[in-house]
Image: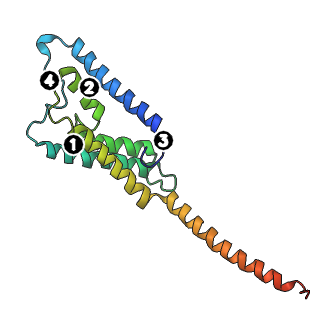
Amino acid sequence: MLIVKKISPLRTFFFIFAQCGGGIAGAAFVYGVTAPMYLGNPSAIIINNTNTPWDKFGKEFILTFVVVFSYFISMDTYRKWVGTSSLTIGSTYAACSFVSMPQLNPARSLGPAFVLNKWESHWVYWLGPLLGGVLAGLIYEYIFNSKRHKRMQQTQDEESSSIHSDDVDNFDDLDKPCHL
């Protein structure tokens, strides 16, 4: 949203800060109320050790791209495809979550990593979603944004009409009597 200038940098900072704080607080709460003998593995980072960090990065990148791009497309007022945008966004996020259940949110990965102090390949859960979201926003903004295309078309129409209006002004001078 910051990259396509839908929200301010300050608001972006507060959203990220709130998400990270909530992720840490939630993981600390779960860690605190869980019996020490039955701690299990609350970490989202350790769940799938069979994939390499680059495999995880690719999955995070692609799934975040899909979620963010579907958000932008469904929130476009000129393109309402099916039902409400909340149904589209929710079903897209649910489908992507089923593919990659514990991830898909950097703050969700930050909380358990912070509480358990396990930072192995943690960069994957930040860089993948950030780059996927940025790419989705840029592709939407510069290729699929119907408002942008309408603005560009209006600008071209205004430029062409101003050219014609200058010509009309010149022809109006021909109607006036000439005093030598």
Determine which residue is flagged by label 3: 7
Q: How far separated are the C-alphas under marks 3 and 2? A: 25 Å
Frontmost of labels 1 and 2 is 2
Name the residue rendered at 78%, 83% in the picture: 171
Give whichever of discs 2 and 4 has the lower sequence position: 4
Give whichever of discs 1 and 3 has the lower sequence position: 3
Colour mapping used in the image: rainbow
Give whichever of discs 1 and 4 has the lower sequence position: 4
Q: Amino acid at mark 1?
A: Val
Q: Amino acid at mark 4?
A: Asn
The picture quadrant where one finds residue 172 is: bottom right
Determine which residue is flagged by label 2: 111
Label for residue 99? 1
Q: How far separated are the C-alphas under marks 1 and 4? A: 20 Å
Q: How far separated are the C-alphas under marks 1 and 2? A: 21 Å
Q: Amino acid at mark 3?
A: Ile
